[in-house]
Every structure is written in structure tokens, then in C-alpha cells.
Image (cartoon, helix red, strand yellow):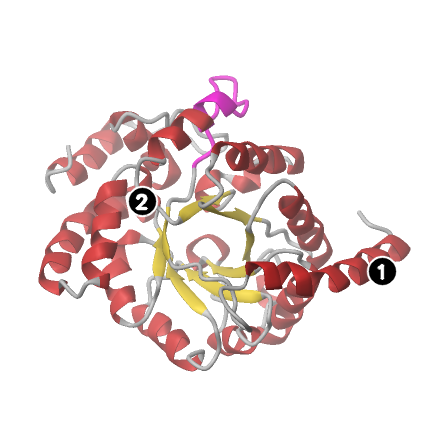
Amino acid sequence: MLGPRVWSSVRQGLSRALSSTVGGWASGEGRKVDISGIYPPVTTPFTATAEVDYGKLEENLHKLGTFPFRGFVVQGSNGEFPFLTSSERLEVVSRVRQALPRDKILLAGSGCESTQATVEMTVSMAQVGADAAMVVTPCYYHGRMNSAALIHHYTKVADLSPIPVVLYSVPANTGLDLPVDAVVTLSQHPNIVGIKDSGGDVTRIGLIVHKTRRQDFQVLAGSAGFLLASYAVGAVGGVCALANVLGAQVCQLERLCLTGQWEDAQKLQHRLIEPNTAVTRRFGIPGLKKTMDWFGYYGGPCRAPLRELSAAQEEALRLDFTSNGWL
């Protein structure tokens, strides 16, 4: 951890650098970066001995690179980041940056439990090539994580981050929804560019869009299951686990929504709901990785304590894809 003197020095140095960094990423005079589009949250491949398999990571990225994604989320929830060491998290981001074209945005998950650790990780993520940091809510002491605490946390991180910050609310994993009033306050920060909201509450997404409409602030849906509805209330894209296996279809849904072809978009969205639920809420990362194996990617094992699916679960997973015409 940084000592008090080093911490103060880092704070001063990053604060001085912030304006030039943010300016370089701005999409126009006085505007924040545009993060609109579809992002698959990249999984972390492991060997049979639970080591990170960087070769398989690069193979997956090469295959995913054939789709018109805006970029990739690395070290988000689907990347099993809580199970990786700090050095592994950074090495994964570094390898992804080396494998990606420069026009693809790399959103790196840098959230930690303490503000200080989050700042350190965010700075390190920037050094290894992240374009923006996606910062999950600290949650271990969730009973004390009220709006005031979270506003203070994210403000400190954004003040010191040399890259733009995207808020990340994922209550299924954290037990904590980033309060709307906190989001509205944080949207005014010049280095906070948007939020990934994975809660699935479309009224909340619409309210955030409405309440931040005077700010240059963007909302990304956190799942393909409510992507159409999120676009309808003003979201600009999505971070969708399903895009790891149905990338073309998720991008097609994006195009249909953006071009106002709502009837066709509705039909496609309906066929994506059950598969999406299967690889997220129902079977989680083990389900996503098993499906990746079926679709020609490397899914492989998860790190313990996550376990592989049972035969019955695998059969139910397959049914969710076959019954909708995807397998």
C-alpha cells in the first residue's frame, strides 16, 4: 500500500495530469468520451491446474474480434476478478491490450474494497493499457455503503484516475445498488463518463438517463436480457455476457434498436432472453464457459470455489439455447 507521503505525491501528480488525459479522450470541446456500443465482458481462461491460460485468452479475442463490438470489458464479474491476484489482473489487461486493435475500447475492472486500493489498481490498469476504468461498488461493509460513502469513494477515485471512470452497479453480486441520487451527483464529475447498470430494473435505468440528461453521461445496460428495453429508455449500449457466444446476434439487436426497427428487435430480443438468463443468473460463469466451449471458443474451467455444471444443469443449459434456435 502507498504510505501517506507517497499517496499525497501520487494525488498531486495525477491531479495535474488529469486534465490533459481526459482532454485527450474527449469526444469534442468540453465533452466526455463516447462509450456507446456493445462490449463482451471477457472471461478469464484457466488451465486444468487453475493457471491463467494467456494463449487461450488471445485465441478467444481473435475470434471475438470478427464482430463489430465497440470494445471489450476485461476483469469484470465474468472475468472472475475476485479470484485473481493483483498481478494476474494487470497481466490479463496487458495481454488484452496487446491483442486488440487501438480503435477498440478496453474497459478494465479496477474496483477494490478500499478507496486507496481502487486508486492504485486504476492507475496500474491505465499503465498497462486500459482506456477507461470500470469501478464496481465496494460492498463488504455494504451496510455502511450509503450515498455519502459511495459519492466520496468514487469522487476520490475519479479525481486521481488518469483515465475516465465508468461506475458499475451489480447488485446480484454485491447486494448493493448504487443509489440513483449518488449516480446523479457523480455524473457531474468531469472524469466520470457513465455507468454499467446490471440490476435489470429498466425503470431505474430510464430514471438515471432522465436525471442525468443535462450531463454528458451515458448508461450501458449490464445484460442482453434487457438490452432492447434499455435502448428504449435511453441507454447507449450494453456490456453483455451473451455476446461472448452470440456476438453477431447481440450486435444485430443493437443495430435494430438504433435504426428504429422495433418489431424485428422485439422478435430477436425474445429469443435471447432464455439463453441470456442461462449464462447469467441461472448458471453463471460456469454456464457461460460451457456455452463458449459449444460455440467454438475456449471456456474451460473456473477457479474454485466455482464448480462445473452437473450433467442435469448442462442439459438444461443446452435446452435454453436449442429451444430458441441457437444450437
* Position of residue 134 measured from the top left corner of the image (x, y, whole percent): 53, 54
The part of the image, by quadrant, that contains residue 214 is: bottom left
User: Is the residue 282 above or below the residue 177 in the image?
Assistant: above
The part of the image, by quadrant, that contains residue 300 is: top left
* Position of residue 295 measured from the top left corner of the image (x, y, whole percent): 25, 29
In reply to whether residue 45 is colored magenta, the answer given is: yes
Q: Nearer the viewer, residue 314 or 16?
A: 16
Q: CA distance from mark 2 to mark 1?
A: 42 Å
* Position of residue 194 measured from the top left corner of the image (x, y, whole percent): 48, 65
Q: Residue at x 14, y 64 (%)?
A: 262
Side of 26 relative to 274 (left or right): right
The secondary structure type at the circle numbered 2 is loop
Q: Name the outermost residue toward the top.
A: 48
Kind of residue indicated by mark 2: Pro
Q: Are marks 2 and 1 in contact (CB under 8 Å)?
A: no
Q: Main secondary structure of the magenta part?
A: loop
- In the rendered image, is residue 137 in sight? no
- Quadrant containing the C terminus in the rendered view: top left
The secondary structure type at the circle numbered 1 is helix
User: Is the residue 25 above or below the residue 322 in the image?
Assistant: below
Dot placed on the residue nearer the N-terminal end, 2 or 1: 1
Q: Nearer the viewer, residue 182 or 64?
A: 64
Disc assigned to residue 68: 2
Number of residues whose C-alpha sits closer than 10 Å to that of mark 1, classed few (under 14), some (14–19) or many (20 or more): few
Name the residue carrying label 1.
Answer: 8
Which range is magenta?
43-57
